[in-house]
Image: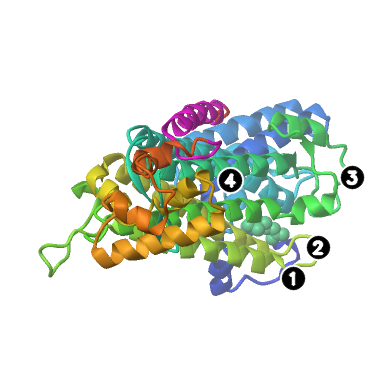
Amino acid sequence: MNKKMWSGRFSSETDAGVDSFNSSIAFDSRMYKQDIRGSIAHASMLADSGIISRFDSDSIITGLKQIESDLDEGRLDFDPDAEDIHMFIESQLTSRIGQAGKKLHTGRSRNDQVALDMKLYLRDDIEEMKRYLVGFCRTLLHLAQANIETVMPGYTHLQRAQPITFAHHLMAYVQMFQRDLSRLEDCLRRMDTSPLGAGALAGTTYPLNRESTAKALGFSGPVLNSLDAVSDRDHVIEYTSDMAIIMVHISRLSEEVILWSTTEFGFVDLDDAFSTGSSIMPQKKNPDVAELSRGKSGRVFGDLMALLTIMKGLPLAYNKDMQEDKESVLDASDTVKSCLGAFTGMIKTLKVNKTAMASAAAGGFTNATDLADYFVRKGLPFRDAHEVSGKLVAYCISKGLTLEQLPLDVYREFSDLAEDDLYDAIGLMKCVNDRDLTGGPAFEVVRKLIKESYVELERYSSSVV
Ligand code: ARG
């Protein structure tokens, strides 16, 4: 058993079960790069401030860089018995460079260290997450572009409501995922302060330069209260809420893809590469990617709930409970990335059945509102127009006809305002294109929004470093 770095005041060994219960190396080893980056900034500031010698600082930095490249290249394995990533790297350093290694932790605590590592990790993670989201949005935009004129029914209560286009429907999701991107940028802005120098909880008596480590690590400045610096996990919760909201969006789209790919809807056909079969029913082709993504939303909501619950009763400042934040946030991040990855492939390869969409739009009286609007234009108050159109729909249902198929003389039995131009007014394409106000489904409006969204995504991807 290795000697513990904090063993000074202890007279006997820790119980082996407690050692393994306590250890976080199995999951916080993922933060080794961030831990080393933070330690390098700290060591170089210690020398700048005259707290350790330049010689010691240089040898610490060289040692840390070697450890990093050994871990990168697989020449060094994490010790599963280490208490956490911080202890592992520090003990590696000391075994490599000797006495100077023992000076790295001057004016620092694992409490400000872990808070820093987490922020650095999430900052890197958010850049990667943005790349996933941008890639997925581009895939949606591409599909929308090809379906600007694909008429389909828009639904409310899952009942056919008014004609829209497939592009218009997809663009609603692009809006959601663009908001997700902007939420991540908000999250980044709010976590832009460095905890380093807060020590265990009350700062330190060494003349540390917190501003310089903050700057070296790319933060706008230090956290302004030492207790808050080590006990704040708002950014972990905020990031995970962002993940939960992304999963809500993915899950809603999943539900639609599942419905659209049923024989009953038949709006889309999933590529074989993104569907699975049944072990008993030879005819089955199942939308597993969409179903799993819908299911995994539950996991991410659980991660968020875990974090909120972990934090809600903790007195200031650090408590070991906070070690539990990592598995939840990492799981949320991994899950969202895996869903976005699989979803992007599924959407890229999906085939659209334009005829099925058009006949669904034609079959469900989706132009009944436009019929009412026609009567309004002829001088009828909207409520009366609604009533007449409703009666016409009921009549058509009883005769098995669509509104387009109903002869003019029958229309005139319901209202003498009906004239020849009625058929033009209820044509599906016209119904869509007359809705050309901002945010509407008209071809030109959607075409413009697609263009603008490409530009907006360009902004997000160029802010990805
Ligand atoms: N592994 C710990 C965590 O993740 C690091 C901080 C430990 N601090 C302490 N005072 N025991 O929270």
As measured in the structure, the alpha-carbon distance from the residue carrying label 3 to the one carrying label 1 is: 30 Å
Q: Is residue 154 magenta?
A: no
Q: Earlier in the sequence, mark 3 or mark 1?
A: 3
Question: Between residues 207 and 93, which one lies in front from this camera angle?
Answer: 207
Query: Which amino acid lies under the numbered mark 2 shown in the image of this protein?
Result: Leu
Q: Check disc 2 and report the residue beneath it.
A: 316
Measured as percent of width and height from the top left, residue 273 is found at 21, 47
Q: Amino acid at mark 1?
A: Gly
Which callout, 3 or 1, points to the residue nearer the camera? Answer: 1
* Residue visible at 12% across and 68% down in the picture: 281
- 333 horizontally vs 395: left or right: right
Q: Which residues are magenta?
A: 437-462
Query: For the point 72% across and 64% down, which residue is it?
Result: 319
Number of the front mark, 1 or 2: 1
Q: Which residue is mark 4?
A: 89
Residue 13, above or below 134: below
Q: CA distance from mark 4 to mark 1?
A: 31 Å
CA–CA distance in space, label 3 to label 4: 25 Å
Question: What secondary structure is found at the residue carrying circle 3?
Answer: loop
The amino acid beneath tag 3 is Thr
Q: Nearer the viewer, residue 142 or 202?
A: 142
Say which residue label 3 marks: 205
Label pair 3/4, CB-CB below 8 angstroms? no
Percent x, y for residue 180? 56, 45
Q: Are marks 4 and 1 in contact (CB under 8 Å)?
A: no
| Label whose residue precedes the other's in the sequence (4 or 2) | 4
Q: Secondary structure at mark 4?
A: helix
Task: Measure the C-alpha gap from mark 1 to mark 2.
Answer: 10 Å
User: Could you tell which of marks 4 and 1 lies nearer the N-terminus?
Assistant: 4
Element marked by disc 2? loop
Mark 4 or mark 2, whichever is nearer to me:
2
**Badge 2 local density, few (<14 within 10 Å), some, or many (20+)?**
few
